[in-house]
Each structure stands twice: as C-alpha cells, then as structure tokens.
Image (cartoon, rainbow, N blue to C red):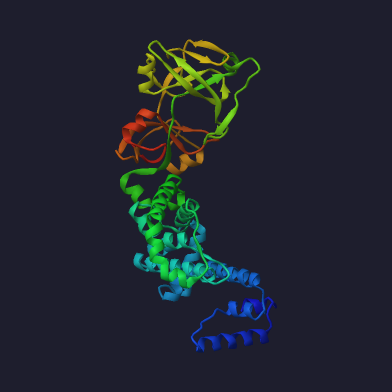
Amino acid sequence: MMLTLDKILSDDQLKKALQTQEEYRQVSVPSRLGEVLVESHAVPATVVSKTLHRQRDMQIRSNTIGQLLLELGYVTKKQLDETMEAHFDVLAPLGEILVDRSICTQEQIKKAIDLQTMRRIAAIRRPLSSSFDPMNVMELLSEECIDDIIHFRDGCSCDKCRANVLAIALNGLAPRYISDMEILVDQLARYREEFGSLVQERLHKAVEQVKMYPKLSCRITERREAGGILGNTMVRISNHHVHLSDHHVKQLFGIENTLTKWKDLLQPSQYAAKETVTLHGHKGSIDRVRVLGPARTESQVEISGTDQFKLGVYAPVRESGQLDDTPGIEIEGPGGRISLDRGVIRAWRHIHMTPEDSARFTVQNRERVNVRLQGDRSTVLEDVLIRITGRSALEMHIDTDEANAAGVAQESEGEMLARA
C-alpha cells in the first residue's frame, strides 16, 4: 500500500485497519480502508484523499493501449516492442500500426480502447466516490451520454477530444455535489430527469466547439481522402468595418488621438478598436461601423453586397489592399469628416494560414480552394483565396451575405476541398 511505502502508516496500523474492515464486512457494514484509517485516527483524511488521487493518476498513466492488448492476448511482448519502435519513429497511432501490420484487427483495437475508457472512468470514480470527496452529479450525467452525442454529431472520439468536450460542457454547467452515495443511487433518476436535457444541450454545443478547433492528430484521414477534403478551418463572419491610416485617425477622432483597443482579434496583432464611424454614400448612411487596428498606410472600407445598395456605392470584390479603380466614400467621426477618393471593397473570401498550415493542407499562397460551409443550408463557396503569412491564425473570413446564404453562425466550421 502506498501509505506504508511512504512510511506514513506502519505495518501494524495497516494490519489492524484490515482486521477492522473485515469485522465491518461480516456485519454487513462495508467500509473503505481509507475511511477505517481516518476513523481510527491512524491517518488524517487529507493524506488519504491525496494518496487516493495519486493512486488514481498512476493507474490512469499505466492504462495504455499496448498493455491492454497484451493482457487481452491480442499481441505478444515481442510484437508490442517492435511496434512501439515504429510508433515512436513515425509518430502514428499504435493501433493504426498494428492494424497495418495485420497483427490486430480494428475490432480488437476498439475492444482495447473501450476497456481503457472503462478502466479510466473506474479509476477516476474510485477516489471520488469515497466520503472524502463529493461527487458532481453533472459529471455523472455527462459521462452517461457523451459518447452517443459525439457519435451523433460526427465528432472525434479520441481521448483528447473526448476530454475537451467533457471539460467544455462541465464548465458551462453549475455543479451539483452529493457526498452521500446512498442518496445518489436512490435519486439519480430524479437528477437525470431534472438536469438531463440541460447536460445534453451543453454536450452538443461542446462537440461543435471542439470540431471548430480540430487538431491534426484528430482528423479523420479516411474521410478526408475519400471526399477530397484537404482539412478543416474555422469560419468567422466579417461584418462591415474600416481600416484607417494614422492621418485619417487624427482627422476623425482628434489630432492627439490614436486608436483604443477594445478586444483582440484571432489574427495576431489585429484588434477591434473602441472607435466607430458613420459611412455616408449617395443613397444612405450606416452608423457605428467598427474601426479595426492597428492603423494602415492607406484607409480601406469593407462592406457587404447588401451594404452597397443601402449606401448607393458599388464596391467591387477585391483582395484586401488592392484598391485600384475602387470607389470612394465619406466617413464621419466625432472629430471630423473625410472624403476618400478610393478604398471601398467587398472583401474576397479568404483563408489565413501559416506556412506550416499550408504544408499540412498541401496548398500554396494565393491558391484557390473550395470550402463547404457547415450551416443549416450546406453551401460550397468556390475560389476561396489562400493567404499565407508567417504570423497568422488558421481562419476563414466571409461576409454577412455569404453567411446568411449558408445559414452559418458567427463561428462555424468549413471543409477545404480540392478544386477539380
């Protein structure tokens, strides 16, 4: 026992505690050894609780797929050792290598993963179900249905993604703790009826959130290859906004003023400023248009197709910064009003990525791809521009008209498709 190895508990104290535990069992009063030790004042409750959690962590770390396959008799020690060498060389999943080498079947790998999951849950539950740590009912209810929901929403069920889904869902659920396990067993059905729908709702949202930020190790390569899918990207809706030069910032907001950061954007060093302006066109105006920072060398206004009809300004579809032969507009701020000779565009749909991303997706800078938007009206956008820079986050930008056509949310997921 870990307490004796740590010299916290003597052999005599352990022997006496085991005898007491047996006596309790004989009169139908089962007790955990740690509870007996605390009751007899041999060890403080805090020490028992820490030891139980340390024991749990050791069990989880030793609960490997390779060890389970060995225990189940699906591999020999020699086969496992040889496959582990290849596993570290190519960094491919162990189960995938074993199947490729015809050592194991997919069914055998799945059995080992299922057993690993059950043992992990059991290891976690064991210390939590003692009298030293109360149990969160919301976690129990989440564990009951998480796998079905991940499968239903076509999410990744690997350990990492599953843990992320569970963590996100639980962060959005107020905990309900129970310390009396007998009460929990008797009333679990009531808790399920009362909180079950809420738990499932949070899990559905958590699966979609994890899918929005997929990791390379969690991508489903078979699905990607079969459907011509290069990879997934997060999609954000870019509402109308303005980029201003330093000179125009001073004209619109005062000579001493600079842009004031309101919140950071996903793209490094980019931010939404607190400052807003009013756009004035031939037909109408649009108020409270957000200014994005930092300041640029030339001012630029990005609007949607719907905005151009409201303003009476025809804006061509252009890549950001390509302002030749574009119309101008009047911009009004609290400190003044300016008139641009050019600079109004509808932004070409595009994807920001790093050179590492481009290598992963096998695309080049300024290449065009198609993207399937995952909205309630699935839509494929063609000729999406790839923009590769050393400092960028993987993110696709579309305008509000494109988002409305596909029925996508402010943040969603898109599948990059190879063009025919």
Percent of width and height locating residue 217: 46, 52
Picture residue at 42% right of the left edge, 36% below the top: 410
State which quadrant residue 236 falls in. Answer: top left
Picture residue at 49% right of the left edge, 59% below the top: 176
Query: On the rendered structure, is 226 left or right of 236?
Result: left
Percent of width and height locating residue 413: 39, 41
Picture quarter with the N terminus:
bottom right
Tell me, yes or no, if residue 219 can be seen here. no
Picture residue at 39% right of the left edge, 10% below the top: 282
Q: Please, is residue 74 above or below residue 225 in the view?
A: below
Tell me, yes or no, if residue 206 can be seen here. yes
Picture quarter with the C terminus:
top left
State which quadrant residue 379 falls in. Answer: top left
Query: On the rendered structure, is 362 left or right of 249?
Result: left
Q: Nearer the viewer, residue 376 or 58?
A: 376
Q: How many marks?
A: 0
Q: Please, is residue 275 above or below residue 284 in the view?
A: below
Percent of width and height locating residue 294: 58, 26
State which quadrant residue 336 falls in. Answer: top right
Percent of width and height locating residue 200: 38, 54
Picture residue at 33% right of the left edge, 54% below the top: 152
